[in-house]
Amino acid sequence: MAEGRPHALDTWRVTTDDAEVAARVATLLGRPASAERRGGEPAHEVLTKAETVRVLMDGPDPVAARMILWSSRGMVHQCDGLEFLSPEEKKGKPCGYPPRLEGRKPAAREGRDPTPSTSLTFRIAAEPALGNFRFTTSP
């Protein structure tokens, strides 16, 4: 994995800086939590064995979908498919990518165009008091 770039896992991974939240998630979703340090801060991780997780969302706003162009140094820019969302100096300007997904795929595979990224903020239905979690995906 390139530093700063997301990658796919074969399982659900839940991370938190709160040991009690990690322990409760581990109980709910079936595997023990592990502890490590990330950037000098404690981090707890649970690699679950649950195939599905029932979640609660507060309306449509917790869903964010955008296109992100990555480089070996991290994110270059992001757009909503029509206009740039970042960097700040390009925000609101047309991103100029093909309007249809079929036209975007070849250049995205070659690393010249952005790829889809989606995030969802939710609470675990079995224990909403644990607070908000975020599911993130990108190819």
Image (cartoon, rainbow, N blue to C red):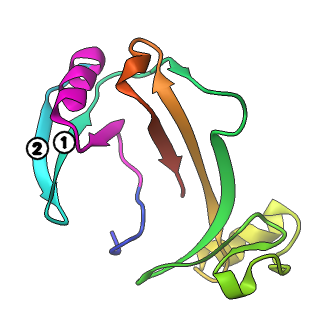
For label 1, the crowd category at 10 Å Cα-Cα, with few meaning under 14, some 14 to 19 and many 20 or more, is many
Looking at the image, which residue is at 63% across and 39% down?
Answer: 62
How far from the left and from the top, in percent, is residue 2? 35, 74
Q: Nearer the viewer, residue 109 or 75?
A: 75
Which residue does the numbered mark 2 point to in the structure image? 35
Query: Of the numbered discs in the image, which one, if any, rests on residue 44?
Result: 1
Badge 2 amino acid: Ala
Q: In the rendered image of this protein, does residue 108 appear above or below residue 139?
A: below
Q: Quadrant of the N terminus?
A: bottom left
Q: Quadrant of the C terminus?
A: bottom right
How far from the left and from the top, in percent, is residue 27? 21, 17
Magenta stretch encompasses residue 25? yes
Tell me the element at label 1.
strand
Q: In the rendered image of this protein, does residue 48 appear above or below residue 107?
A: above
Q: Quadrant of residue 109?
A: bottom right
Looking at the image, which residue is at 74% across and 78% down?
Answer: 91
Badge 1 amino acid: His
- The boundaries of the magenta stretch are 8-29
Tell me the element at label 2.
strand
In this view, which residue lies farthest toward the right?
A: 99
Q: In the rendered image of this protein, does residue 5 appear above or below residue 139?
A: below
Q: Quadrant of residue 18?
A: top left
Is residue 120 found left or right of 18 in the rendered image? Answer: right
The answer to whether mark 1 and mark 2 are in CB contact below 8 A is yes
For label 2, the crowd category at 10 Å Cα-Cα, with few meaning under 14, some 14 to 19 and many 20 or more, is some
Q: In the rendered image of this protein, does residue 80 appear above or below residue 95?
A: above
How far from the left and from the top, in percent, is residue 89? 70, 88
User: How many numbered markers are drawn?
Assistant: 2
Looking at the image, which residue is at 35% across and 21% down?
Answer: 50
